[in-house]
Image (cartoon, rainbow, N blue to C red):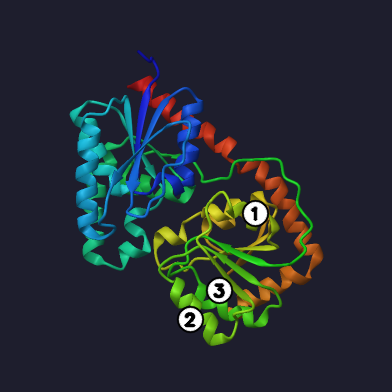
């Protein structure tokens, strides 16, 4: 019989595409834990990519809405009921109820991994009844998860203010790998990530009328069709290129060749304003200066290592001016790029992993 401690982690995402969870589970596995990640299998899901840890997918045809959460949580509860485990970890509020009740029922320690301020996400705050429901779940569960971690200090402070919990910071930083910055044959601008409402495409796309460079967009989302229509209306088809969904293993080829990265959000929710996006680290690790909003977490890192041009106000004019400076001011660009190469040594997964493992070491020491 294995003497390894078995940790079960739960998500609503498809494990094939959840880079943060694959990073976390790989680190836990490499540290000597037995790891199982439970996620969702959608109707169009591809076969599971083989990993070093065990993966389980719950089939779920209904893809959104309250019925999705109700069915998925019921199926997850039943799966957890009979699964061997020594500890459970809920990732975000949408899997926290099954983890909470199973951990109490089976007397197993539990961990909360908060990727977001879930109740303050834009898609939640714009629906008051939905937000009220999630806040009720959060108040019922989070104070009973004494062990946890989240992605930045702003989120840590919010969870402490609301629920008195002391969570660790485990950022979504990129794995540090050897880097040779290539010669940039084409000075293109890159946006990678979800093409969703609130990601400033209404300002970014018109800004390209004043910028002498191409914008490549890697990703899809709920604003994808509107973004394409906007490009058509402005006659920017030759300048704004949509690549659609790009698999995670193919994305670094676009990032390393990019001249400028884009990390912009509208602060329509507290979660957005206090966020620290994965792409911020991806650009940093490829030595790519970027354009970002002057929100607290970006400002904190930029104050330590100036790697980005931060915007006070997000308008087509301010975006165009910032992009044009990055494209034409060689000394400024080189300054930011060299800072990226310094910052990546500090903000990398190898450092974040230490804090992750410390949470579980403390959990089992006190269990």
Mark 2 packing: few (<14 Cα in 10 Å), some, or many (20+)?
few
Residue 110 position, x and y percent, is 31, 32
2 or 3: mark nearer the eye? 2
Left or right: where 32 falls relative to 240 = left
Q: Residue at x 80, y 65 (%)?
A: 330
In primary-sequence order, the first of circles 1 and 2 is 2
Local secondary structure at mark 3 = loop
Residue 169 position, x and y percent, is 48, 41
Residue 333 position, x and y percent, is 75, 62
Q: Residue at x 47, y 56 (%)?
A: 275
Q: Residue at x 43, y 71 (%)?
A: 223
Q: Quadrant of the N terminus?
A: top left
Q: Residue at x 54, y 77 (%)?
A: 203
Q: Are marks 1 and 2 in contact (CB under 8 Å)?
A: no
Q: Are marks 3 and 1 in contact (CB under 8 Å)?
A: no
Mark 3 packing: few (<14 Cα in 10 Å), some, or many (20+)?
few
Q: Residue furthest right?
A: 331
Local secondary structure at mark 2 = helix
Q: Quadrant of the C terminus?
A: top left
Q: Are marks 2 and 3 in contact (CB under 8 Å)?
A: no
Q: Nearer the viewer, residue 216 or 90?
A: 216
Q: Which residue is mark 2?
A: 229
For the residues labelled 2 and 3, the Cα–Cα distance comes to 25 Å
Residue 306 position, x and y percent, is 68, 56
From this view, report whether residue 207 is shown above or below residue 310: below
Local secondary structure at mark 1 = helix
Q: Which residue is mark 1?
A: 253
Give the quarter of the image for residue 264. Answer: bottom right
Q: Which residue is mark 3?
A: 313
Left or right: where 160 falls relative to 246 = left
């Amino acid at each position: 019989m294995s003497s390894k401690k078995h940790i079960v982690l739960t998500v609503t995402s498809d494990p094939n595409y959840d880079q943060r969870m694959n990073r976390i589970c790989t680190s836990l596995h490499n540290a000597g834990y037995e790891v199982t990640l439970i996620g969702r299998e959608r109707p169009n899901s591809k076969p599971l990519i083989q990993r070093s840890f065990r993966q389980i997918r719950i089939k779920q045809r209904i893809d959104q809405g309250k019925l999705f959460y109700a069915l998925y949580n019921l199926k997850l509860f039943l799966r957890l009921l009979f699964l061997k485990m020594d500890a459970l970890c809920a990732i975000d509020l949408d899997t926290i109820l099954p983890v909470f009740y199973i951990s109490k029922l089976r007397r197993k320690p539990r961990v909360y991994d908060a990727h977001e301020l879930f109740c303050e996400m834009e898609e939640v705050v714009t629906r008051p009844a939905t937000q009220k429901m999630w806040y009720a779940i959060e108040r019922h569960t989070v104070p009973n998860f004494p062990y946890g971690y989240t992605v930045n200090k702003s989120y840590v402070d919010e969870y402490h203010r609301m629920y008195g919990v002391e969570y660790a910071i485990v950022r979504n930083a990129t794995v540090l790998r050897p880097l040779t910055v290539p010669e940039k044959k084409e000075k293109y601008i890159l946006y990678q990530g979800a093409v969703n409402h609130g990601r400033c495409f209404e300002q970014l796309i018109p800004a390209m009328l004043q910028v002498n460079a191409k914008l490549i967009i890697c990703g899809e989302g709920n604003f994808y069709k509107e973004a394409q229509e906007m490009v058509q209306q402005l006659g920017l088809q030759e300048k704004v290129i949509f690549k659609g969904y790009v698999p995670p293993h193919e994305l670094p080829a676009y990032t390393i060749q990019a001249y400028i990265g884009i990390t912009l959000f509208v602060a329509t929710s507290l979660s957005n304003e206090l966020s620290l996006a994965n792409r911020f680290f991806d650009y940093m690790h490829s030595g790519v200066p970027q354009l970002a909003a002057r929100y607290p977490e970006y400002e904190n890192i930029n104050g330590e290592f100036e790697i980005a041009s931060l915007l006070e106000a997000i308008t087509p004019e301010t975006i165009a001016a910032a992009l044009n400076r990055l494209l034409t001011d060689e000394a400024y660009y080189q300054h930011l790029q060299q800072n990226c190469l310094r910052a990546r040594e500090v903000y990398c997964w190898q450092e974040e992993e230490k804090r992750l493992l410390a949470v579980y070491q403390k959990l089992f020491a006190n269990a």
